Image: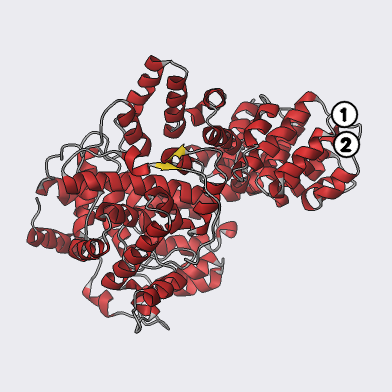
Amino acid sequence: MLSNKLFSRIVMVAMSAACLLPAAHAQKRSAGFASDDDAFLALRDASRRNDAGRAADIAANLGNYPIPSYVDYYQLKARLKDASPAELQAYLARYNGSAIADRLRNDWLLDLGRKRDWVTFDEQYPQFQLNDDTQVKCYALMSKALKGIKVADEARALLNVPKDFGEGCIALITTLMETKQFDEDDLWAQIRLASDTGSTDYVRRFVPLTGIEDGSLVAAMDKPASIVARGVGFRRVRHEVYVVALGRIARNNPAQAADVLSNNTLLLSKKQEAFAWAQIAYQASMKLAPEAVQYWRKAGNAPLSLEAHQWKIRAALRAGDWKLVQSGIEAMPASLRDDAAWTYWLARALREDGKIEAANARFQLLAPQTNFYGQLSLEELGQKITVPPRALPVTDEEIAPMVTNAGFRRALKFFDLDLRFEGYREWNWELRKMNDRQLLAAAEFARRSDVLDRMVNTSDRTKAEFDFTQRFPTPYRDIMRANTQRQGMEMAWVYGLIRQESRFIMNARSHVGASGLMQLMPATAKYVAKKIGMTDFAHTQVNEIETNILLGTSYLNMVLTDLEGSQTMATAAYNAGPGRPRSWRSTLPRQVEGAIFAESIPFSETRDYVKKVLSNATYYAAMFEGKPQSLKARLGTVAPASFVPTDLP
């Protein structure tokens, strides 16, 4: 293991070699700013406002800033639309292979697509390494389609999340319609998808492609009752608009939409009727309505969005309809069907159908994975959850390249500036091609640099060698032990929650205003402080380690008590508020496994949160107790109960 003294010496040598803090630069101040860091932050803001003049003025005084690639990027990005190809090529050559160069290529590709400069786009697109921008992918398919290449199947697979579309994907759909690669069925499938996800603006942009001039499609989105009231009509366009309107009504009242459809099916084709039932079933499933499974049966084999496919299975799980679970998962696109969640639930359905060998084959596929479904699969095979043997400690030679890694140094600088997004981009870029030993060394470097979230994230990526002291750290253990023991709480569960809440970033702040290690909302912190008698509490204390843990564990214990000791329910309540899990439970048609309750939580953030917190807690318990654990026992069962409001925030 690298000693702290040797680590510090290597860091100082690396920083000196990279000229991160030259003496002259340390004394310099950019004109009009208290420090070069302040100037750099102002440059970033100017670039994001596309204020090219301001960006150029600030950048002129940052000639010695330790991250020149970003100084140049922000200056160039502010005038991207006017920059010459030669300037952009020069930047890409100067910083070739870096994360920020790939980011600029992403920006440039979007601009090239908007300008329809397909020659330059086609030259640059193969060099876009991350290739993680849906709109860029749409432009790439559009370029192919305009050359006569058949891309309809690729487009159908790509065009499934309207919020990611942007101008490029709308233009792609238009192009495919004009070149006859898409037909009316494809167009209306996209309109229904946009309607299902509430993307009214996208539906408006499809209007010219439909030929509708009477405003009825927009009315179907904004005033669906008026469209339903005028009747189904006889033309296909009227039918399709009617189906969209029913889907919009179902967003608020699935039962009402179902009643309307039941009385107006004669003029619809079987395909249109199935589409309508699928839209109603999807909305009913997200509202946890018991009738959802009935609606899904009426929908038959109607084409579904990726989200609708998943909600069909969640509704079936709540109802205990394992045949629908099996048929629904088998009907998913392969990319979705192979996801760990649906591999696990398909295995469960196969076992219910008596196909033990096929079920066990899928459980065995998942069991090596150190995640929620891997843990559950291990238990389905008759085993319990244990901590894997620890890999050999990384050596001085293995960690030294991480200390001198330019991308990691940039990331640490960004973390110091509280620019976590930029820091994550730089850090994760460096991890892309690392093997397990390198990842463990990078994680150790993160530990010693006191960025525990990067330690966890980096160590989580290893496939065959594991160090769970990196993956599941226990900082502030004395404070945590004192608080959990005093309240009779399980320390493993609290650590599991913190690992998901803040990844041990003490000054973490969420987009909704939650703060600190245990991500407390201001109103919650104030409420808990009053309840436990902290008469001198001020909100500025919420980021203090001891206060944050005291308030967070106290609130978690209140929620646990309020929800009859169910960690599954209490974990959901900590994220979404205590009233919501009670409401979700009240709609259950029967008692269900905790895993099914977690799987069918309507909020995607909370659903993911509950799974990860309880999976984390199970590993922490295995570490603390030194014996095998059961995630299924921790999840328990959840039974239906009448919804009773609570006064907890």
Is residue 312 found left or right of 370 in the rendered image?
Answer: right
- Cα distance, mark 1 to mark 2? 7 Å
Of all residues shown, which one is farthest toward the front? 642
Count of numbered badges drawn on the protein: 2
Looking at the picture, tell me which residue is in the foreground, 18 or 534: 534
Is 572 drawn above or below residue 177 in the view shown? below
Q: Which residue is mark 2?
A: 232
Q: Position of residue 319 (x, y in %)?
A: 55, 33
Q: Which residue is mark 1?
A: 267
Is 6 drawn above or below residue 290 in the view shown? below
Q: Name the residue at 34% across, 79% down.
A: 534
The amino acid on which the numbered mark 2 sits, given as a three-letter code, is Val
Q: Position of residue 493 (x, y in %)?
A: 30, 52
Q: Position of residue 457 (x, y in %)?
A: 31, 49
SS category of the residue bearing label 1: loop
Is residue 320 found left or right of 444 in the rendered image?
Answer: right
| Residue 61 seen in the current view | no
Q: Name the residue at 19% across, 51% down.
A: 444
Give yes or no for contact between labels 1 and 2 (Cβ–Cβ under 8 Å): yes
